[in-house]
Image: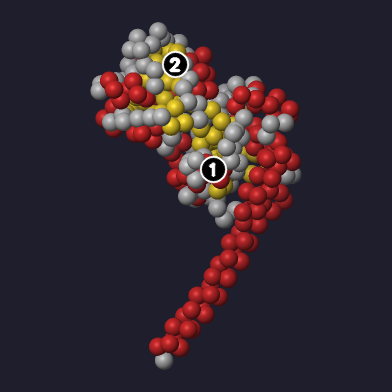
Amino acid sequence: MRRSVLKGMVALGAVAAVLGTAATTAVAQDALEQAQESGYIRVGFANEAPYGFATPDGKLTGEAPEVAKAILAKMGINEVDGVLTEFGSLIPGLKAGRFDMIAAGMFITPERCEQVQFSEPSYGIGQAFLVADGNPKNIVDYGTIAESGDLTLAVMAGAVEADYAEKAGVPQDQLVILPDQSSLVSAVRAGRADAAALTANSIARMADNNEGVESTEPFGEVAGESVKGHGGFAFRPEDTALYEEFNKHLKEFIGTEEHIELVSQFGFGEGYLPNKTTEELCAGE
């Protein structure tokens, strides 16, 4: 009797697994079909120039949104609505259905790969710090912060820079966790942080657009490891059809003349093309 019940439970479990797989496939297909039928999709962004931001008149732009719009147009989806979200809330917002993909230049990391499905990367870039004009404290990289014992470093909540700081041996009490890019600038200008960490492109733009601050020289290693970050577009794992169609067009697009011309206005170009695959990045290689 016990064996029969167990057999029945196994059989029911197998049926449930098949039905669950079918349901997941249907949902994944629906995400793409719905976007194509309506010609409309929502994307999450974090207002971090030059990766993804809103202009004063409300236009969604930046490297990631513009590449996304170009790829989505090839898929028959011409209306893209941006949903402004704090960086640390982008993945939870995607999983909760607030938007259908993330177009924020998000770095592809093993930890994030466990939560979302990433496209192939659209760029690769190193790090830099925002510091006060003249760099009076001679800050070079994360090692400078770790060795000082008293210098403070501002990082953005949910961004990869906090992980880099930890690898370099920066104690938590020397970190200032802030929600967005403008907060990083304000902290350095007001002296609440001695430096702020982001990608070299973002830091250069912040320095150009704000008085009293400058960028350190870009660097590509932390604690002897490469920190050249590669950014891509994130999707819910169950939205397989949407991800696969987007990724197919993206791989054909990256590195073309059309792509380089599109992203050069944001400081990207041939020198920022990716040199790793998503499979390698998700594996931590």
Instruction: Report helix, strand or loop for mark 2.
Output: loop
**Is residue 234 shown to the viewer in this render?**
no
In the drawing, does residue 19 fall left or right of residue 90?
right
The residue lying at 42 percent from left, 25 percent from top is 197
The residue lying at 30 percent from left, 25 percent from top is 146
Looking at this view, is 177 or 248 the one in front?
A: 248
The residue lying at 39 percent from left, 32 percent from top is 164
Q: In the picture shown, does residue 257 fall above or below 216? A: below
Closer to the eye: label 2 or 1 = 1
- The numbered dot on residue 280 is 1
Q: Residues within 10 Å of mark 2 (few under 14, many from 20)?
A: many
In the drawing, does residue 141 fall left or right of residue 276?
left
Residue type, numbered disc 1? Glu
In the drawing, does residue 45 fall left or right of residue 191?
right
**Is residue 151 shown to the viewer in this render?**
yes
The residue lying at 43 percent from left, 35 percent from top is 160
CA gap, disc 2 and disc 1:
29 Å
Q: Which residue is denoted by mark 2 in the rendering?
A: 216
Q: Residues within 10 Å of mark 1 (few under 14, many from 20)?
A: few
Looking at this view, is 244 or 169 the one in front?
A: 169
Q: Position of residue 143 (x, y in %)?
A: 35, 24
Q: Position of residue 263 (x, y in %)?
A: 65, 26
Q: In the picture shown, does residue 181 fall above or below 235? A: above
In the drawing, does residue 214 fall left or right of residue 173?
right
Q: Can you say which quadrant of the picture contains the N terminus?
A: bottom left
Q: Position of residue 203 (x, y in %)?
A: 48, 21
Q: Earlier in the sequence, mark 2 or mark 1?
A: 2
Q: Position of residue 94 (x, y in %)?
A: 52, 46
